[in-house]
Image: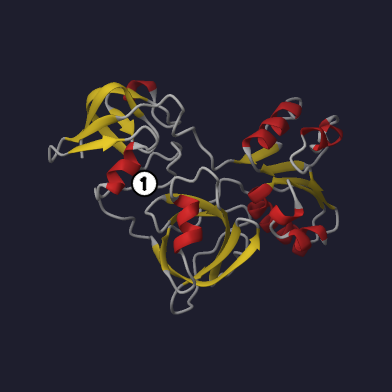
Amino acid sequence: MDLPQDRLTLQVTARKDLARDIAEFTLARPDGTALPAFTPGAHVTVETPSGAMRRYSLVNDGTAPTTYVIAVKREPGSRGGSASMHDDLAEGAMIQVDPPENDFELVPAPHYLLIAGGIGITPILSMARHLTAAGTPFSLIYCTRTPEETAYLDEVSALPGATVHHDNGDIDAFYDFWDHFETPGREHVYCCGPAPLMEEIKAISGHWAEGRVHFEDFAGVEVVRADDTPFTVTLAQSGRQIDVPADRSILEALRAAGVATVSSCESGTCGTCKCRLVEGQADHRDLVLMDEEKDDYIMICVSRAKSGDLVVDL
């Protein structure tokens, strides 16, 4: 499979630790020339050293950038993406990056409420910096477990209208958002963070007008589940058989076996890894395929065999 023609080859020009298990990477062209512009809330898709494709929000100003700045949290259950960024991506290394995309665009509003949880601060901080420079009023609520796990703590704390809340893992100390949502105002809300935070905001904002509350979620669908079992995928074009372990996706198993594939989100949301299903019954877990496509196609980044083995057109 061919790689996207517009993919960028960038160099890690700086790396620094921001907080416990969070590192910031500055990426640039080796010759220092300009990069494609982007707007607050944008992200890039990065081919990590392990070969996994992961999406990371851009933190820096995107008006006329010569660098892309991302912050990466090492996830406890990492299947190779964030762990390889932390362990294998040193200053001076080269990395493949797709041009910026933005599914979390700021819309015009008289006021904004920005909500971040953990590493979800990255697109939110980009927005806060932009709104501060433009003189646009906003409030910001940033929730983390402890100060030691809080990226950009000093900068966010210094922003007018910002609240930083640490709950120390105590459920009784979680931030109470209800006062901000009880009576719908004129502001637009932007929220990025772990699933429990976003689910809470969705639950308490159900009475707000549609389109007023915006979410950024890179988690996609649950790729590996506790009751998953191993199976075999046969590549129809070569007859090669690849074993897929219970704790790995088809895409990850193919990558480990040296089979070239194309992917982007690796969370079942973009459709890049769509393959023709030649034989077998798939357990479809993606958010892309239409019902009439499910007998003939499979998204190999998240979907598995429902029973038995599969044959795919690769």
**Up/down of 219 relative to 311, above or below:** below
Q: Nearer the viewer, residue 291 or 242?
A: 242
- Residue 211 in sight from this viewpoint: no
Say what amino acid the circle numbered 1 marks. Answer: Ser
The C terminus sits in image quarter: top left
Indicate the position of residue 261 as horizontal and vertical percent values: 29, 47
> Which residue appears farthest toward the bottom when viewing the image?
31
Q: Is residue 183 left or right of residue 97?
A: right
- Residue beneath the point at 46% across and 29% down: 225
Vertically, is 14 above or below 167? below
Provide residue 151's location: percent of width, then percent of height.
69, 57
Q: Nearer the viewer, residue 105 or 246?
A: 246
Say whether residue 251 is left or right of residue 313.
right
Front in this rendered view, residue 297 or 46: 46
Horizontal side, residue 257 vs residue 266: left or right: left
Q: Which residue is mark 1?
A: 263
Say which residue appears at 46% left-offset and 39% top-offset: 267
Q: Residue at x 30, y 48 (%)?
A: 256
The local crowd at label 1, few if under 14, some if 14 to 19, many if 20 or more residues have their Cα within 10 Å, is many
Left/right of residue 271 with respect to residue 65 in the rendered view: left
Which quadrant holds residue 200? top right
